[in-house]
Amino acid sequence: MSVGVSSFIGSRLTQARKARGLMSISLAELVNVSQPTISLYEKGTQKPKQETLDSLAVALNVPVSFFLKDYSIDKPERLFYRSMSAATKAARARAEARYEWYLEIIDYLLEFFDFPELNIPDLDVPSDFRECDEKTIECIAEQLRQYWLLGNGPVPNMVQTLESNGIVTWRTLMGTKTLDAFSDFREPHSFVVLSSDKENYFRSRSDAGHELGHLILHRNINKKNLKTTSDFKLLEYQANYFSGAFLLPASSYGSNFKSAPSLEVFRSLKPVWNTSIAMQIMRSKQLGVLDEYQEKRLWINLSRRGWKKGEPLDDTTPVECPNLVQQSIKMLLDEGVKTREQIEMDLRLNPTDIEKLGGLPENYISGLESKIEPKLKYTNSKILPFKR
């Protein structure tokens, strides 16, 4: 009687299945076992036979050795999402599973590199988030800008600002437009994950500011608060307010206006402050530049111009891309510390996944570059030159 593979780790199966966006019943059909058997594998109460394990590896596109690898990281316990609705549950599960793979890549790279240390100052953040009002958020955002020596002008590059202060940033496909980003406070490095589903430079900067707000204001939040609708809405409002205060500081951005601005004024300021027209409208209302009627008229005009679906300049600027992980992997290879095969073997992931997780070019790890070249026919005929 054949026995199961004793070193198989059931939670790895769960992780890979979620990373591929599969339900257990779908995976069961792919490998020709029952859905309850998949559940037993994932719980660790039953081990798959070698032939079944091979089938699971093929179905989930991971090496067999992936299922035998112990965890090297602490799993995330409290992630801040923009949406916690049932409609995003599957997308969140997929994103979290892939985020765990990303954390393992970071853990691996930290064996060879020193990343910038987490540089978040000890700010006077209320212990009860309900006491964190708009005035407090304005002060905290200003203090952080001063601590990071950003001055009062536009932030040149949000992703570089985060990474240079120990907040590792990852851009990835979320698989749904309702998940813009999420963040995870941990040490020695915190993380901001941005969606690449919408390649919008201005919105992405706002998302980065929003997640930074969570890391600054909400690092000690109880997980149950994320499940309470009223608390969740307040946390999101505070993070959104922080993003506006950080990207558009009151002391300098507000001085642009002598009177109520028009959409054309906001449009002209968009490439200066690198923030959307919509964010500028909201920020101007917060700073008292607009009253409620003026704000309402601007939103109506924005909608009439079709700018709610897409603003001017949205498709003219490439998004800010993280490069810390990409540079680290390339340096391991360029300096001869590791080969591509060794990195693949150490991480026990499909090379395509390593490339996507690390922001690397396609086929960079696998080395399977497609080279299609024309072949000259050998004939007795002469090759005629092109006429000019």
Image (tube, helix red, strand yellow):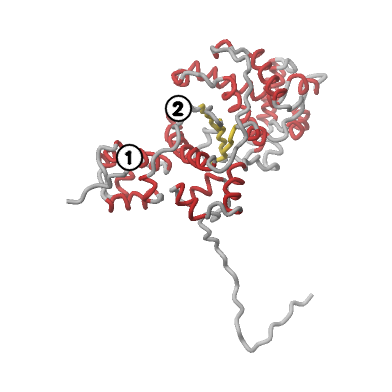
Camera sees residue 156:
yes
Q: Amino acid at mark 1?
A: Gly
Q: Percent x, y for residue 172?
A: 54, 41
Residue 280 picture location, percent across and down: 70, 26
* Most foreground residue, 104 or 285: 104
220 relative position to 21: left or right: right
**Type of amino acid at the residue the image marks with label 2:** Glu
- Mark 2 sits on what residue? 77
* Extreme residue toward the left, this view: 1
Q: Is residue 306 at all visible to an observer of this figure?
A: no
Q: Which mark is residue 10?
A: 1
Q: Regarding mark 1 in the picture, which secondary structure is present there?
A: helix
44 relative position to 147: left or right: left
Asked whether, in this view, residue 210 is left or right of residue 384, the answer is: left
Residue at 73% x, 27% y is: 149
Q: Judge whether 340 appears above or below 77 on screen.
A: below
Q: Residue at x 77, y 33 (%)?
A: 272
Query: In the current view of this chain or complex, which residue is farthest to the bottom?
Result: 380
